[in-house]
Image (cartoon, rainbow, N blue to C red):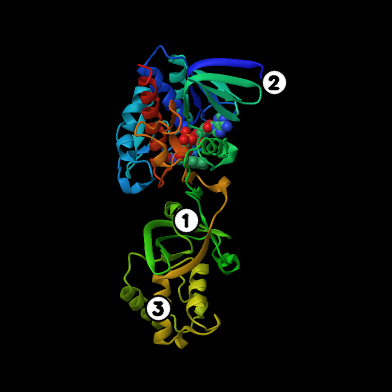
Amino acid sequence: MIENQINADIAIIGGGASGICSAISAKMTDKNLKIVVLEKLKRVGTKILSTGNGRCNLGNKNISEKFFHGSIKNLMEIISSIDTEDFFNSVGLLCRTDSEGRIYPYSNRASSVLDALRISLKNLDISEICGFDLKSIKKSKNKFILESGDMKVCAKKVIVASGGYSSPSLGTDGAVTEIIKNLGHKVTDVYPSLTSFNYKNSNEYKILAGIRVRGCVTAESGRKILESETGEIQFTSDSLSGICIFNLSHLVSKHRNIRIKIDVMPEKSFQEILDFLFYLKKIRRECNLEDYLTGIFAKNLGIYIIKKSIMKPLSVKVLELSSNEIKSIAGLIKSLYIEIVPSEKWNTSQVTSGGIHGESVSNDLESLILKGMYFSGEILDVDAICGGYNLMWAWSSGLWAGKKCAESFK
Ligand SMILES: Cc1cc2nc3c(=O)[nH]c(=O)nc-3n(C[C@H](O)[C@H](O)[C@H](O)COP(=O)(O)OP(=O)(O)OC[C@H]3O[C@@H](n4cnc5c(N)ncnc54)[C@H](O)[C@@H]3O)c2cc1C
């Protein structure tokens, strides 16, 4: 039985990055509106505290359309509608930018970001109702009726900012997306993104567990080259990880049977590597093959490359290597192929690739199915590479949807 009923002009479902921003901008647009943020967890903004390893990479100075994926037509218009640093300065948060353009709070603490946003919510007299786990949305006449277990909220308009499916322990399990889908909205297939790739055959790569190497990673599907990224690659016992791998993980939503090619010496040409390997043959003639590549790579990576590229036991002497075998080793250094399967784990992915399709929303981020319902953040079909871009989408789409929603009362 429903015990409590609350009335509001705008109810915001989800008190995460985009929900908080939508509340702030709606109230700044029209101070007379009664706005309530409905959050499932015990407090708003829990996920913000975990971002950027506790430092919150809240944005990036380098913006390009190619860093974002999704079907929202005016995505770049929305992203460019705010200057992230200016917005945070306006709520009292100082920022710093690193050499690669990534923006962090000056304090280097994600908690400062949340504190500044919560102070704004309080100053603007925006109510937070925590422990409100939305179970259903109904529209009757000009009102939305939102129900959790024992509470009912009636609102003239709603902004749905409940995030995606990634990191369910931080409140986001996709249940609201399913409700929105059942209301008639088009929702794309969803996949975990900014996540690792699992090895198809993990036994083969156990020897590499714990190794980190700077390399160029290329994702291929059949004969097609999809995308390349250069950066640190981390081999774990069952997966390939690292920021450059995370940035390729969105490809899983569009391509099956992806395989990964790693160039583990991207700064050197095939010929330069070959010359050095011939030189090594001269100076390590009496060594076992096991030590042939020691000094170039971590020992186990060297051993793996030799075992994979030639058929000789590691106890054989380096002087027995033929020219063709040395060429095979150099070839493998430039093209180490790894068969992978996409990770299906939501709990280890940072964002959701896919969501409410652009065909179901207007440029104002209002539903084309239910007038008066707006969306912001990760629930929409938008995701981005690492570097602060996902939060940029959350802040900017929240501010955008909040403003448009408040303006619609005039
Ligand atoms: C570990 C980790 C690190 C990250 N680091 C970065 C980073 O440094 N930089 C970056 O740009 N991005 C980062 N991201 C991604 C970024 O956090 C998200 O893209 C962003 O938080 C999405 O904002 P949102 O408001 O749309 O959703 P969320 O922040 O996920 O907020 C949604 C809110 O809705 C609430 N909710 C869900 N269901 C219900 C319900 N039924 N009823 C009521 N409330 C509900 C949730 O509890 C949650 O508080 C990281 C993500 C993770 C998981």
- The amino acid beneath tag 3 is Leu
> What element does badge 3 sit on?
helix
- Tell me the CA gap for discs 1 and 3: 40 Å
The quadrant where residue 5 appears:
top right
Q: Is 181 above or below relative to 150?
A: below
Query: Which residue ends up furthest to the right in the rendered image?
Result: 1
Q: Could you tell me if residue 388 is visible in this image?
A: no
Which badge, 2 or 1, comes first in the chain's sequence? 2
User: Disc 1 designates what residue?
Assistant: 252
Q: Is 278 above or below relative to 101?
A: below
- Tell me the CA gap for discs 2 and 1: 44 Å
Quadrant containing the C terminus in the rendered view: top left
Cβ atoms under marks 2 and 3 closer than 8 Å: no
Which badge, 2 or 3, comes first in the chain's sequence? 2
Badge 1 local density, few (<14 within 10 Å), some, or many (20+)? some
- The amino acid beneath tag 2 is Met
Badge 2 local density, few (<14 within 10 Å), some, or many (20+)? few
> What element does badge 2 sit on?
loop
Cβ atoms under marks 1 and 3 closer than 8 Å: no
Badge 3 local density, few (<14 within 10 Å), some, or many (20+)? some
- Tell me the CA gap for discs 2 and 3: 78 Å
User: Disc 3 designates what residue?
Assistant: 280
Q: Is 140 above or below relative to 303?
A: above
Return the mark for residue 1. 2
Q: In this rendered view, identify the residue nearer to me: 149 or 41.
A: 149
Q: Is residue 94 left or right of residue 181?
A: left
